[in-house]
């Protein structure tokens, strides 16, 4: 007996030459809506009932026919119970934190029919959740439609017929969008703007440096007509792009965390021009 399957054995006696037998079974008491494939012949027979729910009662009976007559045998007792254990949630990690989404991973142990999801919200009351995922092992879900630079509370919820489980409440802040515009081949215009409503793209002298220690997503506006590359020097993994065309605005598909007070170099080069250098010192 296991959490999601059950072996059944029986024996068939008959004088006929064409005999078949099978198991009728179903969820709950007196329910026989499911049937195993037929076994031919007499003597010892066996079948494995699969795709069962854990920690659940099932009814079953044995039936046999020789083509003319059908016999039914009700076991004593005519029910059995699958087993299983309460789900366990471990190894929670937040990856790919962006301005409007984040992906959460976790590992789940328990019966194969265990379901889990992420519950989240801007307060400890949560209020939103991802669709339920069925199965154990490594799990992941992406939360979208979030607000940039905002703390979100979340936890992992797991349910099964053997019991439910919740992880501890955790908090993750979404990324802040940092605007950088590159103005001309003579020098790199590194102006920052967190994208507040009603504010234009950064202008020299009146926009703050981005905060350190928090996830940032850089959006680059190429003010020139030529294509260029752009990257931040001194970070691991590498953060940059060689695909920004002239006049385009490029939002990076990944975030980055910069240390407060450390100076980073922004490198940019237009086609046919020498590299330009700007600096970022997060506050």
Image (cartoon, grey):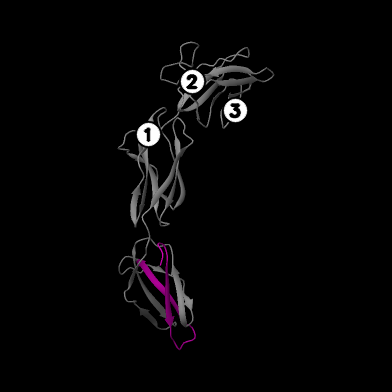
| Residue in the picture at 48% in, 22% down | 178
Q: Split into 4 quadrants, where in the image is the N terminus?
A: bottom left
Residue 132 in sight = no
- Give the mark nearest the N terminus, 2 or 3: 3
In terms of secondary structure, where does tag 2 sit? loop
| Residue in the picture at 38% in, 31% down | 151
Residue at label 2?
261
Residue at label 1?
152
* 187 displayed left or right of 254: right
Q: Which x, y percent locates residue 122?
A: 34, 33
Tell me the crowding category of disc 1: few under 14, some 14 to 19, or many 20 or more residues within 10 angstroms, Cα based: some
**Marks 3,1: beta carbons within 8 A:** no
In the image shown, does 221 or 177 lie closer to the viewer?
Answer: 177
Q: Which x, y percent locates residue 107?
A: 44, 48
Residue 208 lies in quadrant: top left
- Give the mark nearest the N terminus, 3 or 1: 1
- Give the mark nearest the N terminus, 1 or 2: 1
Q: Which x, y percent locates residue 58?
A: 34, 67
Q: Which residues lie in the magenta part?
A: 1-26
Residue at label 3?
241
Tell me the crowding category of disc 2: few under 14, some 14 to 19, or many 20 or more residues within 10 angstroms, Cα based: few
Distance in Å between CA atoms under marks 3 and 1: 29 Å
């Amino acid at each position: 007996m296991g959490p999601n399957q059950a072996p059944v054995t029986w024996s068939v006696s008959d004088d006929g030459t064409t005999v078949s037998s099978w198991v009728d079974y179903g969820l709950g008491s007196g329910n026989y809506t499911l049937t195993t494939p037929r076994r031919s012949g007499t003597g010892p027979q066996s079948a494995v009932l699969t795709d069962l729910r854990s920690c659940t009662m099932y009814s079953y009976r044995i039936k046999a026919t020789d083509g003319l007559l059908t016999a039914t045998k009700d076991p004593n007792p005519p029910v059995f119970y699958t087993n299983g254990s309460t789900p366990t949630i471990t190894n929670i990690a937040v990856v790919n934190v962006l301005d409007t989404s984040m992906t959460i991973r976790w590992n789940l142990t328990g019966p194969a029919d265990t379901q889990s999801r992420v519950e989240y919200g801007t307060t400890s009351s949560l209020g939103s959740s991802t669709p339920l995922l069925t199965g154990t092992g490594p799990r992941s879900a992406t939360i979208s439609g979030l607000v940039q630079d905002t703390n979100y509370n979340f936890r992992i919820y797991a349910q099964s017929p053997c019991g439910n489980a919740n992880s501890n409440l955790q908090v993750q802040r979404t990324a802040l969008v940092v605007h950088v515009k590159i103005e001309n081949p003579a020098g790199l215009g590194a102006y920052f703007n967190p994208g507040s409503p009603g504010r234009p793209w950064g202008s020299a002298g009146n926009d703050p440096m981005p905060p350190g220690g928090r996830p940032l997503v850089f959006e680059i506006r190429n003010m020139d007509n030529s294509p260029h590359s752009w990257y931040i020097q001194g970070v691991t993994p590498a953060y940059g792009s060689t695909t920004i065309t002239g006049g385009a605005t490029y939002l990076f598909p990944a975030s980055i965390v910069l240390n407060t007070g450390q100076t980073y170099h922004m490198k940019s080069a237009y086609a046919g021009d020498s590299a330009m250098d700007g600096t970022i010192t997060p506050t």
